[in-house]
Image: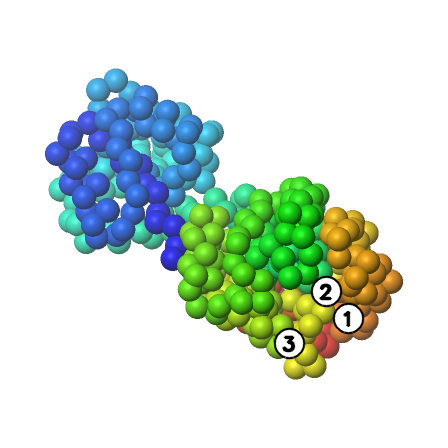
Amino acid sequence: MTTPFHVLVVEDDPDVAEFVKLVLVKRAGMQVDVAGNADKAFNLLQENEFDAMITDIEMPGASGLDLIARIRGLRPLLPIVVMTAHASVDYAITALRHAADEFLTKPIAAAHLVERMTALAQRGRTDRLSAAGQVVLAIGAHPDDVEIGVGGLLAAHQAGGDSIVILTMSRGDRGGDPNDRQHESLASADLLGARLFLEDLVDTRIEPADPTVSIIERVVAEVSPTIVYTHSSHDRHQDHRAVHQATTVATRRVPTVACYQSPSATVDFHPNRFVPIDGFTEAKIQLLACFASQSDVRAYLETDFVLATARYWSRFGGGRSCEPLEVIRDTSVIGKAWTPSRRVPAHSPGQAPQ
């Protein structure tokens, strides 16, 4: 499930405003706000993120063109459609000179309205998310799973200005006190500046279907990730396999999905992307140090083990330390190599470091 496009309709004629809203809601499934004048529209734009805007030109007080000129400094990437009842070349030229993206003449056919607004809203959302950086969602079955698998990579994403969200499906009560593990998870998320979703599924009994799928779908709809990291299917732990299966269903519309290695991964774990984390190994060690309740009983949390693992994978990637990934979907860009972070190049097997 993806978040519906959010569109602002600026129109002083209530009948026209209702028609445009009804078409976009019923036929395109959009979320639509309506403003009857430029001042109200500007206030809404200050308080909300919109994927596109459609405005009339002639309105009481400030015109639609005045509104466009006013908001371009506030929302430079927002696609704007101008509509008017006057089919005039002069109007069209004036609208375009005021940085409108399209000019439509009333009455507007419903099908054409849906087609153009959907295309522009998609472009607006993509541009806005790209300008804001990636939204990275890391999903794990238990506390410390994502930090072990992609702690260095998440630190690199943070340094690159990306937004980080961690979804942990259980509180890990089979491996320690759930209250301790909750505090540890919060401490790690705080170091990353990440938003943490900590769920209450039963440790060792996580299902690959609902409620796991529904939980992931809810978080995906709320944060709109562009990259998801999760468990591999090649894993001895049943919770890890279940989270992997649920994630592949719930993130089917996310552009990039990749799987990390856990300590219980099998020899069938076959990474096809190796991400250098030079400069971020110390950050990963600090993240893992947050999980003090586990460090005395889990050898794979020992610093030398973590560093040796990253050093080993660098033989396939670049630099001195790497984290391995099984990329199962990568449609974020066409014709370009996927780079998880703008500051950390990713390498495929056999590819020379850049």
Secondary structure type for disc 1: helix
For disc 2, the marked residue is 323
For disc 3, the marked residue is 236
- The residue at 53%/54% (across/down) is 200
User: In front here: 143 or 95?
Assistant: 143
Q: Is residue 256 above or below residue 183?
A: below
CA distance for labels 2 and 3: 20 Å
Q: Are marks 1 and 2 in contact (CB under 8 Å)?
A: yes
- Count up the numbered dots: 3
Q: Are marks 1 and 3 in contact (CB under 8 Å)?
A: no
Residue 99 found in image quarter = top left
For disc 1, the marked residue is 313
- The residue at 71%/60% (across/down) is 148
- The residue at 58%/62% (across/down) is 203
Instruction: Report the residue that reaches farthest toward the bottom.
Output: 268
Q: Mark 2 belongs to which amino acid?
A: Glu
CA distance for labels 1 and 2: 7 Å
Closer mark to the observer between disc 2 and disc 3: 3
